Image (spheres, grey):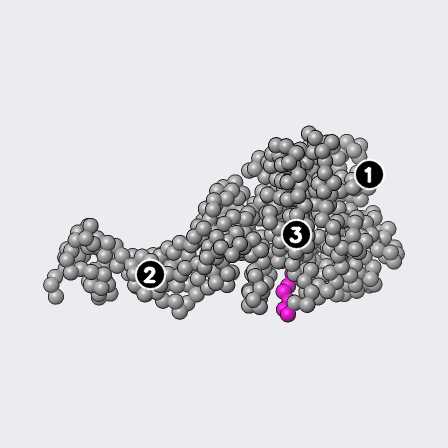
Amino acid sequence: MEGMTNSAVVLADTAAYAVAVEEASQAAAAYYATGESTLDDDAYDRLARGIAAYEQAHPQEVLAGSPTGKVAGGAAVGDVPHTVPMLSLDNVFSAEQFVTWTASLERRIGRPVEAWSVEPKLDGLAVAARYREGRLEQLITRGDGTAGEDVSHAIGTVVGLPGQLAEPVTIEMRGEILMTTEQFEQANTVRTEHGGAPFANARNGAAGTLRAKDRPYTVEMTFFAYGALPLPGSGELAGTLAELPHSEVLAQAAELGVHTAAGTDVAPRTVTTVEDVQLRVEEIAALRASLPFGIDGIVIKADLAADQHDAGSGTRAPRWAIAYKLPAVEKVTRLLDVEWNVGRTGIIAPRAVLEPVEIDGSTVGYATLHNPADITRRDLRLGDHVMVYKAGDIIPRIEAPVAHLRTGEEQPVVFPEACPQCGSEIDTSEQRWRCVRGRNCRLVASVSYAAGRDQLDIEGLGATRVVQLVDAGLVADFADLFALERE
Ligand SMILES: [Zn+2]
């Protein structure tokens, strides 16, 4: 599992390296522009690691366009300067790497880290929300970390980011904007009703929505604060924020009325030992599939301001915090076919046949599709690239087609006109289609099969007659055929 997430694309020569750099910068640019990338996160990470490995071996060949060491993969967006750079986080992928990281941090500050804050790494977009005298004035994306884009038009559509704080303070809240699973479903419903293509996943939905202006509809998003810092004019608060432990900064943000992860099952927690960090990491990882929002890891921070101060920051990431990445649970693959299976009660359920893809440690070849209306609503087509989600033991599901990867060769999904099991009519009056024979469907099918030419070859017992016998209650299983009397 860790080996998989940790693996890198192997680049054989200069040409392969150049192609990889080009591919990575295009993906990063597309991702930061619209939230849509031609690569899923895992593929991007593997490519970026391959590029970094090649550069380490061939330092004289490093191209200017390389994403290595750049916030946002070097994608340039936005022109509102950040007061303090909005950095990325370095990653670890295993307990072992985490322990190594803590040791190097403690060596750097020359003492043990006194307390660790452990919190979910929300799978959204980092933003800075500037409050002046308690009023939300400006919303800025992370951009390249030095400057971001003004997305203040989204103020008022983000749950957890109030227009007015509980106190008239001047402060910058930093956090993630995301769509919860429910908001994502709702956004795709509204969007497809307006003739738009559905978002491939919740983060694409949040990215696209945050940047969109003048849409004829609004969709909701949610903010989770992960930090706060002073702005010019913060007054005394500046001194307080500089001294408070991270955990208390979050508590203050919540008191001011800004949403944090405190009320969730994966609430930030402060612990004192590396072992306890690891336990909490495992707890959060286990809760992932059941959360009403997406996380892609766990963030661990030195809690005390003094520890943070002494550790300092590099150009790309602070040295006092790390992202413990969880395996990717979303991958892009192709929808090859849709199968229609009839259940015991006659429900006719569609199932997606996928080009097999490795997700979260297992190979996924099928995904659930709820019902025909769902296929229509998502505008799924055979041959589509689709975003597939799987975490833990849950049944894999298709989030949505990746509409911008369409070639025009995609074919509509063909819906059955008769029950695929017994050939009877289909009751399409409900969202879930059902064979009109209901519980008798399988019986009709098995009796017809048994009576068929290649089996018992019972003359005069065609499909119509079988249906009559079953509907009249004369045949409850195929042994009853032998007990039938002429009447
Ligand atoms: Zn049937």
Is 285 left or right of 335, judged from the image as shown? right
Nearer mark to the viewer, of 1 and 3: 3
Rendered-image quadrant of the C terminus = bottom left
Q: Secondary structure at mark 2?
A: loop
Where 256 sits versus 355, above or below? below
Residue lying at 60% horizontally and 56% vertically, measured from the top left: 202
Residue identified by numbered label 1: 310
Residue in front for this viewpoint, 334 or 423: 334
| Residue 85 part of the magenta-drawn span | no
Residue marked by disc 3: 30
Marks 1 and 3, how far apart at CA: 37 Å
On screen, residue 400 above or below 91: below
* Residue of label 2: 419
Residue 91 badge: none
Disc 2 + disc 1, Cβ < 8 Å: no
The amino acid marked with disc number 3 is: Ala
Residue at image location 65% in from the left, 58% down from the top: 208
Which quadrant would residue 303 be assigned to in this image?
A: top right
Of residues 231 and 242, the one drawn nearer to the viewer in this rendering: 231
Helix or strand or loop: what does disc 1 sit on? helix
Q: CB of residue at label 2: within 8 Å of ligand 1?
A: yes
Please provide the residue range marked out in magenta: 216-221
> Marks 2 and 1: which is nearer the front?
2
